[in-house]
Amino acid sequence: MFSVNEQKAIELGESGEKAVREQNEYDALQYIEYLRELGEELLRVDRPEADFEKDLKRVAISLRNIGNKAVQKQIQTVASNAVEVIGTLAEPSIEKDFSNALWSFSKAVQEIGKGAAQAEMLETGGSAVKTLEMIGKGAVAKKMEVVTLWTTMSLEEIGYLAGKKQLLDLSNAAKTAREGIIKASEDNGFVTREQIVIYPQLISQTISEFSDMQNLQPAGYEGSRPNEEFTEEEFFEEEAEEEEPETGTSGKEK
């Protein structure tokens, strides 16, 4: 059963998606703003017994859905705004050591950014790169291993997809951001370059054994399969129940 906050995030997300489908940019931006306000309200509350990270994940999903729909409709202002709001919510999440919420935020930006690269939406793609770099460096500082690995993989995917579209500035920006996170991690004695490089390969090898999970295949590691947009729908919706992102490498357990 959804909490009151989760239900509110779902309703705002669905309304935002409807506004995008109807080409109503003003209303779509308003629903993104409402989601920002909801996320900031959740981040202000200091009650450890409440599972606010779960509520924040639902906010991330709604922002992702609006952003993805905006990419499909080529409404760059809405797509970019969704990414920027995710970044606004990610910064205090880093300070609070909310690794689960950050993983959701990074995956939301990953998907919007990859769609933007494929749709040749440079402004949105650039915003996604900057937001992932910020989340990744924050994850390094807070010793969040999975978030660090995920953001570097996401940037590699955006760089790969942008390169295929000959969007060299975006591709180079993604590569530079990824390298910055790797260097920060190495300087902090955290996740090694070898671990970061092998991470998407391990995911690809695992997913290749399960035909019903092919939409999780990282871009650039699909083997003989044609490249597909990374939608991660089933995985993203069930992440809270099926997997914990941190494994004791950070100072706090979620």
Image (tube, rainbow, N blue to C red):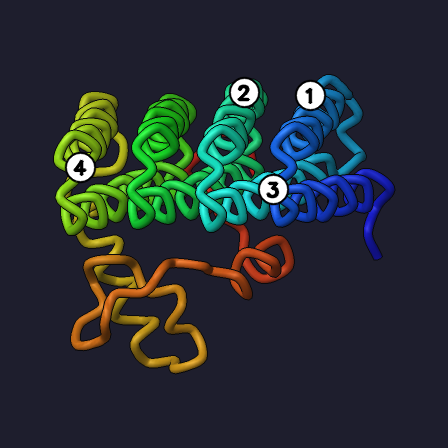
How far across and down, in percent of the image, does residue 84 sit?
A: 49, 24
Answer with mark 1 or mark 3, whichever residue precedes in sequence.
3
Q: Quadrant of residue 19?
A: top right
**How much space separates mark 4 and mark 2, taking CA atoms?**
24 Å
| Disc 4 target residue | 171
Amino acid tagged 3: Gln
| Dot 4: element | helix
From the viewer's side, name the closer residue of 119 and 210: 119
Mark number displayed over residue 40: 1
| Dot 1: element | helix
Amino acid tagged 4: Ser
Amino acid tagged 1: Glu
Identify the image quadrant of the C terminus.
Answer: top right
Answer with mark 4 or mark 3, whichever residue precedes in sequence.
3
| Disc 2 target residue | 88
Answer with mark 2 or mark 1, whichever residue precedes in sequence.
1
Q: Nearer the viewer, mark 3 or mark 2?
A: 3
Answer with mark 1 or mark 4, whichever residue precedes in sequence.
1
| Dot 2: element | helix
Assess whether mark 2 and mark 4 are in contact (beta carbons under 8 angstroms): no
Assess whether mark 1 and mark 2 are in contact (beta carbons under 8 angstroms): yes
Mark number displayed over residue 23: 3
Q: Residues within 10 Å of mark 1 (few under 14, many from 20)?
A: some
Q: Nearer the viewer, mark 1 or mark 4?
A: 4
Identify the image quadrant of the N terminus.
Answer: bottom right
